Image: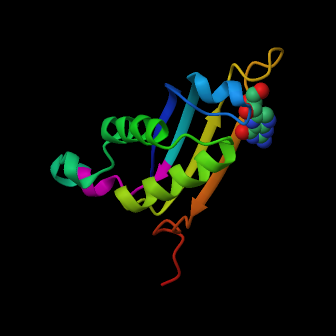
C-alpha cells in the first residue's frame, strides 16, 4: 500500500501528568504515516482523491489543543481514532515526541500503529 506522511509537525499544546504541566503549553513533534492508494489522485491529478497533508496537519493541531490529556499514550490513541474516522484512513503509524520532557534525552515519546494494512495488489491472491 502507498503511504502519505507528515514528519516533524511541531505544535504547542497542553499535555502532561503533573499539575504544573496543565498550566503551560509544551512542544510536541508529530510524525504520521498513512496508508493510501495514491494512484487514485494521480489518475486525474485531483487533490480531493487523496489525503491532504496540509488539512491533516491543521486538524492534528486543532485536535491536540481541544483535547488536553495527561499522557502521550492517551493523545496518541484518541488522535489516531479521530484521524482514521475523519479522513477514512485504513492504517496509520503515529509518533508523538515530547522533546522537553527529559532534560538529558533528545526526545521521548510514543509510537502506535492502528488499522489494517491492505496487501498490495501484486501480493494479493487471485
Ligand atoms: N510513557 C509516558 N511516560 C510519561 C509521560 C507520558 O505521557 N507517557 N508523561 C510524563 C510527564 O507528563 C512528563 O512528560 C513531564 O515530566 C512522565 N512520563
Residue 96 included in the magenta stretch of the image: no
Quadrant of the image occupied by residue 94: top right
Colour scheme used in the picture?
A: rainbow
Q: Which residue lies furthest to the right in this view?
A: 104
Residue shown at the point (37%, 62%) measured from the top left: 88
Which of 2 and 47 lies nearest the eye of the viewer? 47
User: Which stretch did the figure color magenta?
Assistant: 34-41
**For residue 48, above or below residue 117:** above
Residue 108: in sight, yes or no?
Answer: no
Instruction: Identify which residue, 119 or 26, lies in the foreground.
Output: 26
Answer above or below: position of 50 versus 22. Answer: below
Q: Where is residue 120 in the image (x, y as percent from the top left)?
A: 49, 65
Q: Which of 22 and 117 is in front in this view?
A: 22
Q: Quadrant of residue 71?
A: top right
Lateral position of residue 22 relative to residue 54, left or right: right
Residue sitting at the far bottom: 126
Residue lying furthest top in this view? 104
Query: In the shown orientation, is residue 90 left or right of residue 116?
Result: left
Residue 29 image position (x, y, % from top left): 57, 28
Residue displayed at 25% across by 49% down = 42
In x, y percent, where is residue 27? 58, 22
Q: Is residue 88 visible?
A: yes
Q: How many labels does the image show?
A: 0
The quadrant of the picture showing ligand 1 is top right
Rendered image quadrant of residue 43? bottom left
Instruction: Identify the residue at image location x=45%, y=55%.
Output: 82
Amino acid at each position: 500500500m502507498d503511504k502519505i506522511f507528515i514528519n516533524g509537525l511541531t505544535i504547542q499544546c497542553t499535555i502532561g501528568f503533573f499539575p504544573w504541566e496543565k498550566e503551560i503549553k509544551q512542544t510536541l513533534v508529530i510524525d504520521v504515516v498513512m496508508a493510501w492508494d495514491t494512484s487514485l489522485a494521480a489518475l486525474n491529478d485531483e487533490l480531493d482523491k487523496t489525503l491532504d497533508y496540509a488539512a491533516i496537519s491543521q486538524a492534528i493541531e486543532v485536535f491536540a489543543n481541544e483535547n488536553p490529556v495527561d499522557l502521550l499514550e492517551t493523545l496518541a490513541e484518541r488522535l489516531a481514532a479521530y484521524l482514521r474516522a475523519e479522513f477514512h484512513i485504513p492504517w496509520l503509524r503515529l509518533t508523538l515526541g515530547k522533546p522537553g520532557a527529559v532534560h538529558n534525552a533528545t526526545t521521548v515519546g510514543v509510537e502506535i500503529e492502528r488499522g489494517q494494512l491492505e496487501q498490495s495488489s501484486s501480493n494479493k491472491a487471485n
